Amino acid sequence: MRVEPVPPAAVREGPADVLAALTRRDVDRAYRLAWAILGNDEEAQDATQDALTVAWQRRDSLRDPARVEAWLSRILINTCRDQLRRRARSRVRPLDLSPLPSVADGSQSAASRDELGRALDALNPDQRIVVVLRFWADLTVDDIAERLGVPPGTVKSRLHNSLRALRAVLEDQR
């Protein structure tokens, strides 16, 4: 969720103006990050709206208007994490269709995306979030640590464990 700097006039105005300028400009980026974490259109829309609502309600907690991107990302990530946890608690067990042969559609990339999507679903929320932030949002370990409020070593450990779990799930699917 890389953004251009907030206009200097908005920084002088205060948190409400900074947030208003950012949300008009970057709500689509926030939605795409939420979708990458949640993998579901409706849940991503809800999470984005909820995160923007929380950000607006807590706009006075924005200490450094120049850091609005990290602040908003952290709120969005926490909202997505909560949604993933709610989903895990009320999960309906889907039919396991993995042993069935897939229909040949001439598109190996679609099958690979499906496999990767199922593998991501097998991760816990914290693992899924670090994988998405690292490989989809292309954030550094330090940026991820800042957004999650954890030490960089924790991010590295979660990434290591997440990738190991992804490999195991992908090998089981083949």
Image (cartoon, rainbow, N blue to C red):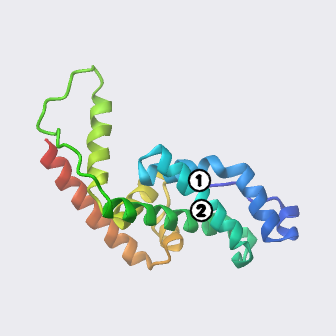
What residue do we see at 83% from left, 71% from top? 14
Find residue 166 and report its horizontal and vertical position in percent. 25, 55
Q: Residue 4: which disc?
A: none
Which badge, 1 or 2, comes first in the chain's sequence?
Answer: 1
What residue do we see at 74% from left, 51% from top? 24
Looking at the picture, which amino acid does disc 2 mark?
Answer: Ala
Residue 1 visible within the image: no
- The residue singled out by tag 2 in the image is 51
- The residue singled out by tag 1 in the image is 30
What residue do we see at 62% from left, 65% from top? 72
How packed mark 1 is, by other alpha carbons closer than 10 Å (few <14, some 14-19, many 20 or more), is many
What residue do we see at 29% from left, 45% from top? 116
Spatial distance from mark 1 to mark 2, Cα to Cα?
A: 9 Å
Front-most of residues 90 and 3: 90
Element carrying mark 1: helix
Q: Quadrant of the N terminus?
A: bottom right
Name the front one of labels 1 and 2.
Answer: 2
